[in-house]
Amino acid sequence: MKPPLTVQLRKRLGRTRNSFSLDLEFHAAPGITILFGPSGAGKTSVLDCNAGLLTPDSGRIAIGEHVLFDASKGINLATPRRQVGYVFQDLALFPHLSVLENVEYGLSHLLRRQRRERSSGILDAFRVTGLGSRKISEVSGGERQRVALARTLVTDPAVLLLDEPLTALDASTKSKIISDLRSWNAAHGIPILYVTHSREEVFALGERVVALDRGRIVAQGTPHEVLDAPQQETIAQLAGFENIFDASVESTNADRGTMTCKLHQEKVGSSVLLETPLVRAEVGAKLRVGIYAGDILLATVLPIGLSARNVIAGNIVSLEQRDVIVSARVNCGVEMEVHLTLAARDALELVPGKQVWLVIKTHSCRLMQK
Amino acid sequence: MSIDWQAFWLTAQLAFVVSAVLLILGLPLAYWIAFSRWRWKFLVEAVVALPIVLPPTVLGFYVLVALGSRSLLGRWWIACTGHTLAFTFKGLVIGSILYSLPFAVQPFAASFAAIDRRLIAASATLGTSPWATFFRVIVPLSVPGLITGVVLTFAHTMGEFGVVLMVGGNIPGVTRTVSIDIYDRVQASDYAGAHETALLLLIFCFVVLAVVYGLNRRPRSLGPAT
């Protein structure tokens, strides 16, 4: 196992309007650490500071004992001397060089024979062996990502920075590349900082997530801790809740691990009671509740004998088809969005105005601080 | 044929030397213009562009004064070599370098500036020094711009008149260039001779520009196709 990356920095970003400061401190152990946040949160700037492409105003960045940047001691290593591998969002492969020449670019200090050995090893590891003589413009998107990873990893970096390298790829190509990266790092064990704004990638990759918003760390922990129990509303919106309501705590049932919240919605002007998981909150406390549209069941008769604790009557306000799902808006005191399949819509003969019951499990109600 | 081949040869020599010198001087200057973040950089850019709009006689006049025996540079040169720079081939080279500077530096700088900065950053993260990055990434990706700059410099120097007349005068075999030869013939009412030489220069310049535009037209897929 290689030494961890420790980052502590402040940096003012942007022009006068819209400017904000990066101000954060984290620690990336060997393995994958995800930097998660909306675009404009400063994720790429954090990577640029680590690579020496951007100079922080203050702070310290080190890989174990190897100090890359220390404002108080006036240390600021030039990028080529940092041993920090960086795969950019647009990959930045050299268009005038072949695949092999790209991969061997960072090995010019070695003898030709050693270069060939190293490059053919890494091309094998990332399954792009046969492409060596091709031009970059002649290989596919997925192959380019592999070449970019190979070009960076062949130089044996002490830390790897990945800036949304896989966003453009389909899910199966993505998961193959991720598993190749994982097996490479099983042997090398370096810290990898992986920037993404995709929730799926966080769950697919994550050992540890650092959530960023406007330059600050708003949450960190396992993907489950950060994304399933969001503490900050920006993360909640990111995590893709279609339904977010203002709520107040009506009563708590500490022995059963639940509480009852009253949801309000200004638009509708009425309210509804919902059983939610228990959190540390006083009766009357103001909270927010997020519910995924896909976590809500819809029934046309009053269901009985269910484990789910919330069965709420309502009326369909509208139905809208989006690709292969149907988004139904249901007024049940507040207006909720529910996702169902085309087949379900047809089988239940759903039309606007029809009376329905919404079924929501207690633990599908995610609570956030307001 | 009444073409003054000596003048042609001299002009070609001048154009060759000036192109070579400007390739060497122009690369670092263009690099600085393309990548410097100095706030007063625009002043330098304006100075570099001056010869495009300045009457050649104005530029020639100041070069002549600077090279003459009363200036610091002129006196130093005389002290070193024993003769003056004005009205010599070397003086002509200096004047022409200044006169053609923008024709080399501007295409160089434009093609450097057009390079994706992330390619340069990628080179640095792969452990490559800025110096090596210049030769391994920036220059190879700027080849069309470099060819354009060199060819334009060559052609522009070939057709130079005002600066040459001011700085070099009209000494056969030393400073008498093609355009001065043409002017001379017209003054002497030798229209047939002037026409032959002028036509030759016209064809030459057309061919050169056709080559430049032909090279730049060739589709090159630079940068990642996304």
Image (cartoon, grey):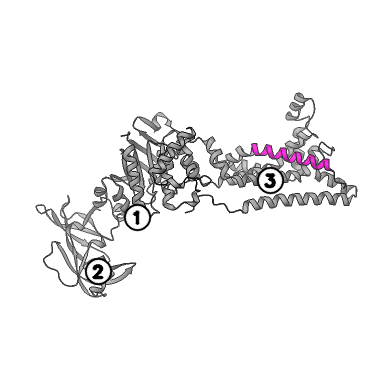
**What subunit carries mark 3?**
B
A288, A240: nearer the viewer: A240
Q: Label 1 belongs to which residue?
A: A171
**Residue furthest right in the image:** B189
Which x, y percent locates residue A349?
24, 75
Label 3 sits on what residue type? Val
Considering only vertical position in the picture, is A13 above or below A331?
above
B153, A288: nearer the viewer: B153
Mark yes or no: residue A48 visible: no
Label 1 sits on what residue type? Ala
Q: Are marks 1 and 3 in contact (CB under 8 Å)?
A: no
Give the class, few, some or many, for how many residues have Cα within 10 Å of label 2's Cα (few <14, many ≥20).
many
Question: Was residue B32 drawn as part of the magenta stretch in this picture?
Answer: no
Kind of element beneath mark 2:
strand
- For the N terminus of chain A, give its image quadrant: top left
Image quarter of residue A344 = bottom left
Which x, y percent locates residue B9?
79, 40
Which x, y percent locates residue A86?
41, 42
